[in-house]
Amino acid sequence: MGHDVSGLHHVGHIVHDMGQALERYRRMGFALPGPAYPVVGEPPEPVGVGNTHAYFAGNFVELVAVAGAGRVPADARLIPLRAPAERLPALKEAVRGTAANLEACLRRFEGVHILMFDSPGIDGAAARLAASGVGHGGVQAAQRPVETADGVRMEPVRWLEIDGVGPGLVPEGRVGLAENTSAHDTAGHPNGAVELVECVLCVADDELDAAEQRYQRYVGRTASRDGAVRTFTLGEGRGRITLVGASGLDGLLPGEGATALPGFAAYAVAVRDVAATGRFLREAGVPVAKTDAGEIFVPAREALGTAILFRQVG
């Protein structure tokens, strides 16, 4: 029987200022289109959250900012919220609820607060989670705009969010599953990034075993153990989720410390040529550090709250 969690779908980096985040990410060599903001009224007023994506062939990194926080970038796309008159108040309320969740995350720290796993069979995954005692909001369906070489297309997406400390929230943020319907079109990233391959969650040392048990239920897999590190491999070449006790974080990412626990401390992207990526970052004036294993990363203080690792493909 195949697993109902097969890889990483995306991580979501929540930022105070979308304009600043776009400048930082583009300087690090990620290709991102202008963000989309839902708007209401005339003249149009941004509401809820704005977002944009660094797309790879099978997953992506999302940048998210609450509308009204920071400036709306000049290349933003304003998307009117349209619904029948009787449904518009409920839609606005849902948008405001999402923004309130993200504002709560930002009060903890600026950085990655969203982790979605890729599921090839989300209905089966929903049943498995419920049977193992994991609460969730059920499978939801919507459409989202996706940038392609031929313009924007609307892509159906199905997802569920795991409930913990609140609806759609676990202690570290928003965690759930999403079902891919198609591969993403990618224009290529100047830093050579081709895939999201890892997310690192840092927890208090005395919470490591409990966090491991939670994620074992989430992904339906058993972790490998190495001291204060627990690693769930999500499929052949499809990425992993790593849990680390706070005392072990410096061993994974020298010089890094957790801003808040639990919290996503880092994510990793695969690159075609890590030496070329290092040269690109240094020439762009982006500070780079090295792990004990020789991998390069941009420290959290330079990457808006969450460190970014660059890993050689193969």
Image: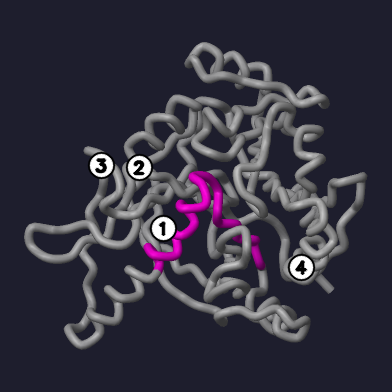
Residue drawn where x is 53% and y is 76% of the image: 167
- The reply to whether the magenta stretch includes residue 195 is no
Instruction: Provide residue 222's location: percent of width, then percent of height.
Output: 87, 62
Q: Check if mark 3's residue and mark 1's residue have beta carbons within 8 Å.
A: no
Q: Which residue is mark 2?
A: 18
Identify the amino acid type marked 4. Answer: Arg
Instruction: Provide residue 271's location: percent of width, then percent of height.
Output: 65, 31
The image quarter containing residue 34 is top left
Instruction: Provide residue 209's location: percent of width, then percent of height.
Output: 85, 61
Q: Is residue 78 above or below residue 282?
A: below
Question: Earlier along the polypeptide chain: callout 4 or callout 2?
Answer: 2
Q: Which residue is mark 3?
A: 71
Cα separation, mark 4 vs mark 2, equals 32 Å
Residue at disc 4, secondary structure: helix
Identify the amino acid type marked 3. Answer: Arg
Residue at disc 2, secondary structure: helix
Identify the amino acid type marked 1. Answer: Glu
Residue drawn where x is 81% and y is 65% of the image: 210
State which region is magenta: 98-119
Question: Earlier along the polypeptide chain: callout 2 or callout 3?
Answer: 2
Question: Earlier along the polypeptide chain: callout 3 or callout 4?
Answer: 3
Q: Which residue is mark 4?
A: 214
The image quarter containing residue 134 is bottom right
The image quarter containing residue 139 is bottom right
Res 103 label: 1
Horizontal arrangement in the rendering, residue 53 relative to residue 259 (left or right): left
Q: Check if mark 4's residue and mark 2's residue have beta carbons within 8 Å.
A: no
Res 163 label: none
Residue drawn where x is 52% and y is 28% of the image: 302
Residue drawn where x is 43% and y is 45% of the image: 15
Question: Earlier along the polypeptide chain: callout 3 or callout 1?
Answer: 3
